[in-house]
Amino acid sequence: MRRWGKVRQGWASPFLSALAKAGAVALVVVRHARIAILLAVSLLLLAGLIQRRLAQQRSRRKRLRPMRRELQSERGVGRLCLGVGILVAPMALLLSPAAAVVAGCLGATLAFLRTSAVLPDSAIREGDLKIGSSSPAQECTCIERWARRLAAMPWRFTRRLADIARAKPSSGELTRLRALPIALIVNSLLIFIFIGGALAVENNAKDSVAESPPIAEAGSEPAAEPPLKKDTERDEEKTYADLCPALPDPLVIGHGLGQAFRHDGGFKAGCGTPARQVRETGAWFSAGICDGQLRSVAITSSPTGRDAVLLYGAAARFAWRSALREELVSAEAAHPAEGDVFLVEILAGTYGFARTAPSGGWGSSKVHTCTEVTATGRPFAELYPPMLLQWRNLLERRASWSWPLREGPTGAALVFAAYPSGTVTARGTCPSDFYCYMYVGGARWSGEGTAYVSLDELSPYMPPSDP
């Protein structure tokens, strides 16, 4: 046991510590994937420029004229690096980071193989490979030529092969020519691989709901506002304690989140669960469950719950997943003109969710459980951090309220409609979480990176709630 303890302290602990640091770095890389891709692209471009420049200079030296073909090939590798960099750079800006990573990985791998292994050698011809039919002198000459080619490659084991073949190493011009560009190409390839791995882990984390209850589909969510007729007697039929026997008193949820569930009721919000804390940020959250599915999420950034809000629909699902990933910071809610505006802040920025009305119509007036609520909630317009910031800028410019609305089934494209006229004031879309653009009149507003927007910045332009 003592020996195992020493092994654990001497090897396992540093390894786990390094793994934790790598995970933290990967999280930062995912949040700034485009910047990391552009860094890798810059290494490729730099490798191409160096490769072409050095090959051009060496090709002019008289004593290296016999290697002219090899030097010209090195210039071709430089052009390949430049071509890959010029291709991947706009892909990183316009397309998803995953596509840019795949293209950059393939291009960097091709450049590496061409410059380190598959360059043609003017001293080697196809006929030289037929060793079995050659004389002993020709075989030695062939081995020597191949050994020279191996010795020119920037790897120690190839020099060892050259020694085994009893051939004199070459002058090392190609080795010196390739050393720095190959290092840059390999570094860019490693960066692409690391970004791809980080993106894959992030996508798996988003798709995994093993720690959470089943999440209802967007179209099957109940409305965020009471969908029942006003003359219903549902409260007299069943109380919150009757609906939620596992935790009949919502105040037991803790950290002030129970007040939100008691206010909205079990029919609407589902049954509250004990509060849990996000260790990284200190935020508290509680899920509202209806028949094993996530109905709502209560969030507070204060231990007393003075700023507790209850989220529904897409905002609730996003906040729940962010909390499980230890990224949830806080949430804010407002209801201008009887609509919903939810802001969810995570470590990577603030995400917005808005809809003009919580429900598409009234549901049945006779329900006995939360599963019998039949009204369907309206879909949210989801605003990534750059688009949320542009929405705020649009409100400031017009000094009046405009609702973001989904345009199309995917929700990636948005249209902004003035309140109450409905006149279209802008259109926008987000190819990724951290790159969005908006067309206002004839101008295009572009936003990239993260953004943090609070409800106080939007509230001066919000219409009052209808009585």
Image (cartoon, rainbow, N blue to C red):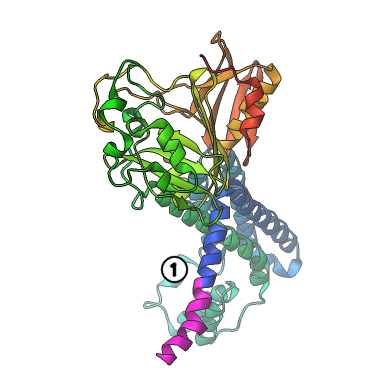
Q: Is residue 184 above or below residue 293?
A: below
Q: Element under label 1? A: helix
Relative side of 343 to 241, left or right: right
Looking at this view, name the residue that lies furthest to the front. 236
> Is 371 covered by the magenta stretch?
no
User: Is residue 248 or residue 228 the one in the foreground?
Assistant: 248
Residue 98 visible somewhere in the drawing: yes
Residue shown at 43% from the left, 49% from the top: 275
Q: Give the range drawn in magenta.
A: 1-16
- Pinpoint residue 29: horizontal percent, then vertical percent: 57, 53
Q: Is the magenta stretch mostly helix, strand or loop?
A: helix
- Pinpoint residue 234: horizontal percent, then vertical percent: 29, 25
Amino acid beneath label 1: Gly
Residue 94 visible somewhere in the drawing: no
Looking at this view, name the residue that lies furthest to the bottom. 2
Residue shown at 68% from the left, 17% from the top: 398
Total marks placed: 1
Tell me the quadrant of the picture where the N terminus can be found: bottom left
- Pinpoint residue 291: horizontal percent, then vertical percent: 26, 39
Residue shown at 40% from the left, 77% from the top: 131
User: Is residue 200 or residue 56 the one in the foreground?
Assistant: 200
Disc 1 packing (10 Å; few <14; some 14–19; many ≥20): few
Q: Is residue 166 above or below residue 196?
A: below
Q: Is residue 52 above or below residue 22?
A: above
> Is 10 covered by the magenta stretch?
yes
User: Is residue 396 or residue 77 the one in the foreground?
Assistant: 396
* Residue located beneath label 1 in the image: 127
User: Is residue 253 or residue 99 the one in the foreground?
Assistant: 253
- Pinpoint residue 88: horizontal percent, then vertical percent: 57, 45
Residue shown at 47% from the left, 56% from the top: 197
